Amino acid sequence: MTNGELPMTSDQLPISEDKSGRAALLTGRYSIFHWSLVIGNWSFFLILLLLFLFCLSLSGFSQGQQEQGRPKPTTRILFVFDASQSMFGRWQSDTKFNIAVKLFSNILDSLRTQPNLELALRMYGHQKQFPPQDCNDTRLEVPFAKDNITRIKHVLKTIIPKGTTPIAYALSQATKDFPPCDNCRNVVILITDGLEECGGDPCAVSLELQKKGIMLKPFIVGIGKNFRDQFECVGTYFDASNEKEFRNALNVIISRTLNPTTIQVNLLDIYGKPTETNVNMTLYDNFSALPKYNFIHSFNAKGLPDTLDIDPLITYDVVVHTIPPVRKDSVKLTPGKHNIVGIDAPQGFLAFKASGNSTLKYLPCIIRKKDQNETINVQQFDQIEKYLTGSYDVEILCLPRLKVRDVEVKQSHTTMVEMPLPGIAVIQKSTNGYGSLYLEDKNQLVWLYNLRDNQQQQETLYLQPGTYRVVFRSKYSNKSSYTTEKTFKVEPGQTVNLKLYPN
């Protein structure tokens, strides 16, 4: 094998000095002619310059279009607010409800200028007095919209806690609160001072909504008492035993939800260096198993793996679509930080050639991991494909099939699989019928291929050098004795035209 490099060439236009202007100035009689040439040259030059600038602007516009990234998603936060009777109880400086509304309102004010953000408010336990118990007491008070913070604050000021605590039912109804959206993140923040009182299962409801991709793993803020054991299965729990902890919990949740979080995926070679690139990566939600992102890996201008903006609230399973693919499960990100994830993906190249440097097209080659039956790729003979480093078994689908075992693919190296130069058999049937191709091997006929019973009157086959026989009967002949057979020999690089019936 030889590795060749295409020589780089550069064409230089000859530059000559035009002295006609100087001569014209000296002689005088040629001055008018000279200046007309000068003006003409300048006009021509100006036209070329304008054309160049126009093409340059088009190129920049096209490049700008191509490099435009995907739009930022809209973050939709649904606040599920407890307004049950227990929220009217005293807590430090005021009632739980009044303190929660005050601190919550301050958080809302800090979000007024946040881009790509929509908020909504669902409440429960605020419509029917307890007792009697009404386990359907929940309602979306403020639907999702832009710039609706003032409306949310106004609604909270008008609410008086009075009812029961149907948390599971409220969460299940929240599915209706998120309008269809192709580029949105759905976040739920539950603020409560108590546990489920209506026999529902908040954990089961939350898990079901996450599996369906309706919402991300929710946040829960427990007021006045630690409910961690009961709510950890629902989502990410924050304990707020006092006002300061409540304020801090809300700040942390908002920070995790909105602060930019980036990830850099290092595709590592066998030396542990991030040199691999140009392959698609699918990031799946570890919990729902739904695909969330697809990125074709690239390097930035500094030659480092590109930085990606992704949702920090999801635990990811990363699948790198090398051949065969590699994956890394349960990748957790630190919100608001730059996260670096390394995945082993050392690769080399596999190519094919026939003896005599002949180029063969449309000849499939099956690629399998060494000593395994699963096909991981079907590569055309004239292609160069990239694979993980390791040993492979190759099956070239010429006739008869050629098997090459234990082909080693090495890091950044092109492994060349060479086969004997085949010949070509052009079998002309002139009629539809039933027939097969056999290899004559030690007085035995080894079946290789069934001729196609269709309107195709000619078939072209790559065959290894050897002696072959075609057995054929026209579909319009009703006697087996009308079977015809032809024996022919194939030489390397030669084409055999075989007519089953004479003209």
Image (cartoon, rainbow, N blue to C red):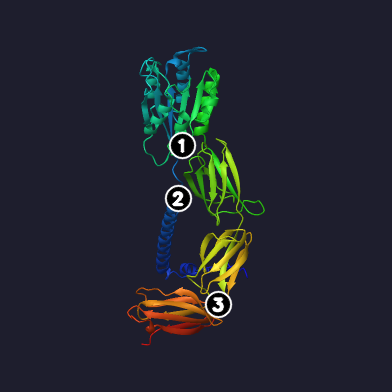
Query: How far is mark 1 from mark 3, CA to CA?
Result: 57 Å
SS class, disc 3? loop
Disc number lying in front (1 or 2) = 1
Q: Position of residue 256 (x, y in %)?
A: 52, 32
Q: Is residue 348 above or below residue 431?
A: above
Disc number lying in front (1 or 3) = 1
Q: Quadrant of residue 79?
A: top left
Q: Amino acid at mark 1?
A: Gln
> Does the rendering let one see residue 149?
no
- Of the image marks 1 and 3, the number of the one nearer the N terminus: 1
Disc number lying in front (2 or 3) = 3
Q: Quadrant of residue 339?
A: top right
Q: Residue furthest bottom?
A: 502
Q: Which residue is mark 3?
A: 421
Is the C-beta separation of discs 2 and 3 under 8 Å? Answer: no
Circle 2 packing at 10 Å, graded few (<14), some (14-19), many (20+), is: few
Q: Amino acid at mark 3?
A: Leu
Query: How far is mark 1 from mark 2, CA to CA?
Result: 37 Å
Q: Which residue is mark 2?
A: 64
Q: Which residue is mark 1?
A: 210
